[in-house]
Amino acid sequence: MSGGTDYAVHPSAIVDPGAQIGAGSRVWHFVHVCGGARIGERCSLGQNVFVGNRVTIGNNVKIQNNVSVYDNVTLEDDVFCGPSMVFTNVYNPRSAVTRKDEYRDTLVRRGATLGANCTVVCGITIGEHAFVAAGAVINRDVKPFALMAGVPARQIGWMSKFGERVPLPLAGAGEYRCPHTGAVYRLHGDTLAVHA
């Protein structure tokens, strides 16, 4: 690995001039980072990852092997992208029709997990600490802490910040205390909120 004075790039990777990569980040085998990309600190880009020009990636983001992060995708801090998961940026692509001016923005909020081989259809927001199961297809907005599975995905529960399922119904006064962090989770209507 070589690269800048504060991040590492494998010799087989291509980082185009102008790309910004934060301190402590690692760019692995056969990665291509386009010149307009903005990547935060302590990120890991696994083998064969592609990062487009109009992409913003926060700090401590883990992108596993074979993921393409196309234009108009934003990943906030602490997002996890599982192996071979898919982003899109055109809703109705046709090879014979140019739609580069129709890219839709996709936002993945802080701490969300996108499981292996899942697909995220463009133009949606995935809430903080949401958890998308392997192989799921996300075609609409996802609530914070929601556990999503299936094709198309539907919500099947809730996940804690620690990455464990929040048991329902909530015990006691309608709350769940995480045994790992001590954080307390409460349902407010159809929304889960955490109280430190």
Image (cartoon, rainbow, N blue to C red):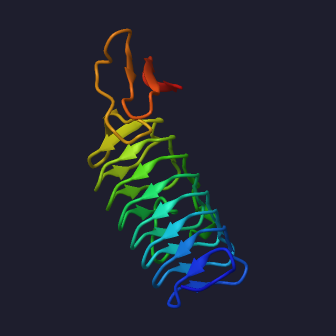
State the count of labels.
0
Give the residue at the far top of this rendering.
Answer: 173
Q: Is residue 145 above or below residue 2?
A: above
Left or right of 134, for residue 63: right
Find residue 106 and report its horizontal and vertical position in percent.
55, 53
In the rendered image, is residue 95 in sight? yes
Image point (44%, 33%), residue name: 181
**Residue nearer the viewer, 162 or 82:** 162
Left or right of 62, for residue 77: right
Image point (44%, 38%), residue name: 161
Give the residue at the far right of this rendering.
Answer: 18
Find residue 171 and report its horizontal and vertical position in percent.
31, 15
Find residue 31 and report its horizontal and vertical position in percent.
50, 80
Q: Is residue 196 above or below residue 114?
A: above
**Residue nearer the viewer, 127 or 153:** 127
Give the residue at the far bottom of this rendering.
Answer: 11
**Residue nearer the viewer, 20 or 107:** 20
Image point (38%, 44%), residue name: 131
Find residue 14 and report its horizontal and vertical position in percent.
57, 86
Image point (39%, 29%), residue name: 178
In the rendered image, is residue 54 in sight? no
Residue 56: quadrant of the picture: bottom right
Left or right of 35, for residue 70: left
